[in-house]
Amino acid sequence: MDVLKEIGNIGAGHAATALSKMLDKQVDMNVPNAKLVPFDQITDSLGGEEQVVVAVYFRVLGDAPGNLFFVLTHDSAKKLLKGMIGLEVTADGYSDLELSALSEVGNILAGSYLSSLSDFIKINMQPTVPALAIDMAGAIMSYGMIEYGQMGEQALFIDTMFMDGSEEVEGHFFLIPDPDSVSKIFQVLGVQ
């Protein structure tokens, strides 16, 4: 599992640099946890199926296709928008600008993590344009299960902690490789 955390840390470093440039302020990131999670336990990692979350979804294309999710709780999304970007979220929901900002942060993170993983395992992996959704974790993850029979049984799970001074925001990153991609990725990572 050390290699998964190392890949997460490299991706976090790249993402922190990109976010710092975009926001013109210091942003630090670390990876407190990186592991493989059985597919049916993904929503448990998010606080249960009924937990309302903000998710940015990508289809991964290239030599090892799969599905990629960046997920924040509602509270974490608000803290991210307010603390780092300076946008105040109202009780009525998110404005178009706030949704665009969340999508862009997810896009930067996904690109950074996927680039780190792709470089490490020497396999071409590219994310598609992001799609953002706000709903219960079970509903969002079931979107990724539509083609469940064609998806792997495990997800690469990486916790991400954003730090802007003393303010911390936690996000979750899931990569669910397609079955044909699992052996390619996990064999290189030395994972059974």
Image: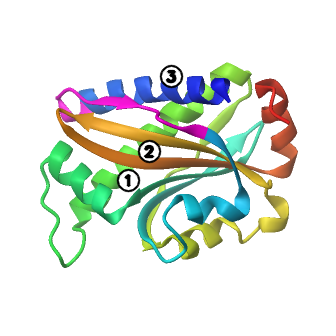
Q: Are marks 3 and 2 in contact (CB under 8 Å)?
A: no
Relative height, residue 134 to residue 180 (above, below): below
Which quarter of the image is occupied by the N terminus? top right
Which of the two labelled residues, at mark 1 and mark 3, occupies the earlier sequence position? Answer: 3
Q: Which mark is residue 107?
A: 2
Q: Amino acid at mark 3?
A: Ile
Residue designated by label 3: 10
Q: CA distance from mark 2 to mark 1?
A: 6 Å
Q: Look at discs 1 and 3 and give the one toward the viewer.
A: 3
176 relative to 166 in the view: left or right? right
Quadrant in which residue 29 is drawn: top left
Q: Is residue 33 magenta?
A: yes
Q: Are marks 2 and 1 in contact (CB under 8 Å)?
A: yes
Residue 91 placement (x, y as % from top left): 17, 76
Which residue is located at x 53 percent, y 47 percent?
A: 173
Q: Which mark is residue 103?
A: 1
Q: Is residue 105 magenta?
A: no
Which residue is located at x 38 percent, y 61 percent?
A: 73
Q: Amino acid at mark 1?
A: Ser
Circle 1 packing at 10 Å, graded few (<14), some (14-19), many (20+), is many
Residue 176 placement (x, y as % from top left): 69, 51
Which residue is located at x 30 percent, y 57 percent?
A: 77
56 relative to 183 in the view: left or right? left
Q: Amino acid at mark 2?
A: Asn
Residue 76 placement (x, y as % from top left): 31, 55
64 relative to 132 in the view: left or right? right
Quadrant in which residue 125 is drawn: top right
Highlighted magenta segment, given as a residue range: 22-34
Q: Secondary structure at mark 2?
A: helix
Q: CA distance from mark 1 to mark 3?
A: 21 Å
